[in-house]
Amino acid sequence: MKIPLSELKQLIGQPVAAIDTPSLVVDLDAVTRNLVRMAEFARKHEVRWRAHAKAHKSSTLAKLQVQAGAVGVCVQKTAEAEVMVAGGVTDVYISNQVVAPAKLARVAALAHRLAAEHGQLAIAVDSAEGIQRLARAMNEARAAGGGSAVIDVFVEIDVGQGRCGVPPGRTAVTLVHEIRKHPPLRFAGLQAYNGTAQHIRSAQERRALVGVAVQDIVFTRKLIEAEGIPVELITGAGTGSMVGEAASGVYGELQSGSFMFMDADYAANERDAAQPHFEHALFIKTQIMSSGLQHAVCDAGHKSHAIDSGMPAILSIVNDDDETQTESGLEYFNGGDEHGIVRPARSGLRVPALDETLWLIPGHCDPTVNLHDHMIAVKGGLAKGRVERIIRVDARGALT
Ligand SMILES: Cc1ncc(COP(=O)(O)O)c(C=O)c1O
């Protein structure tokens, strides 16, 4: 039977050993340290940060980020925005395109709700049609007595990922003019996010890709400003490349999200000397259920963690008093959706024994979180800590 929240809450105050497997566990101390390091980094570089909530899908964690200094959150989906607002987050940016009229009606309703609560909604666009549909939805919400909210609109330029966004240059200027025709829309700046740059292993190559983005932004910004229109804010960046964007003097807002959990894929990047030390903070607690001479099998397969960015790493927690997070010398191999095959990485290392607990560091935090209803938040370390709270993944499955 699926464990109801009321029963899960009985875990609060209990030692980590009481957590059943497989479970999604958050190390709240590591989360706090990561947030402090992010806030310090942003302060030092005089940029704001708007954490991407797609990484955690939880309004509780979003509010923790705002308490730590984030100006608000980014989301990718209308439904995620709705969940964040319902959970009490008042400054939300949908850093993505929304074009379906039914969804835009929800966006407009949310913009009006937030305006009534002294909050703000923002959205990205990359087509004239999208802008006109957004304006229509906002006007309809106004006419229906929803108030006179104004939504902030960022023109997305494609700075190298080949995903959404118009090419840098004239097309962006045309879209800015289109936005300015519609009173319920306010041109707020440019969205310039390069997802490809995040996962390039070489720190130097990541910096080089940010350099290309910066040239594209400066070129586009000049064209817009030549028309007498100020470009207030450039927003973008993720955990992999944020040191480049922060140092550019061009970006005013960082959208990094994964830094708070730090998955195995990001840990495999060569660390830029200027990057804050972000610790792993999201784990799958799993148990060995079969053990032989060459390998063991744990009870967490890819229904527990996403494998799109590779297999999880396995953490060693011999001593978590000194905050060290070291590799365990064990390797995880895909055993299917309910099994993980665990082998010593080198000869001479032992195979884990029956019942032994392992802590997996997921390859990709965002889709891993989306597989779970709750995160079990722990304080005091993974070896000797206790369960502090149960955090609902309230935007789980919020995909529309
Ligand atoms: C538009 C946008 N901004 C920011 C991010 C955050 O990046 P990360 O979670 O890798 O820090 C993403 C991630 O995919 C994104 O798509």
Image (cartoon, helix red, strand yellow):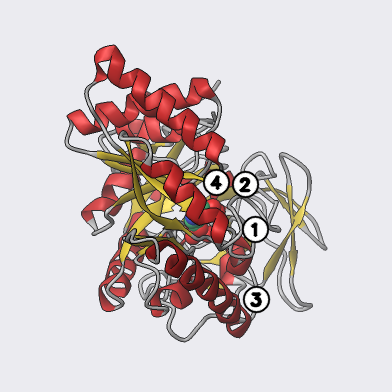
Which of the labelled discs sits on residue 270, or is there none? none
Q: Quadrant of the N terminus?
A: top right
Alpha carbon separation for disc pair 4 and 3: 29 Å
Residue behind mark 3: 201
Q: Position of residue 2 (x, y in %)?
A: 53, 23
- Label 1, label 4: how far apart the Cα atoms are: 35 Å
Residue 279 visible to an observer of this rendering: no
Of circles 4 and 3, which is in front? 4
For discs 2 and 3, the disc positioned in front in the rendered view: 3
The label number, if any, that marks residue 126 in the structure image: 4
Which one is in front in this view, the residue at disc 1 or the one at disc 3? 3
Considering only vertical position in the picture, is 4 above or below 40? above
In this picture, is 205 found above or below 194? Answer: below
Label 2 packing within 10 angstroms: few (<14), some (14-19), many (20+)? many
* First of labels 2, 3 by sequence position: 3
Q: CA distance from mark 2 to mark 3?
A: 22 Å
User: Disc 4 versus disc 2: distance between alpha carbons?
Assistant: 33 Å
Mark 1–mark 2 contact, CB under 8 Å? yes
Marks 3 and 2: in contact by CB < 8 Å? no
Amino acid, disc 1: Pro
Question: What residue type is disc 4 on?
Answer: Asp
Is 315 left or right of 93, judged from the image as shown? right
Q: Which mark is residue 305?
A: 2
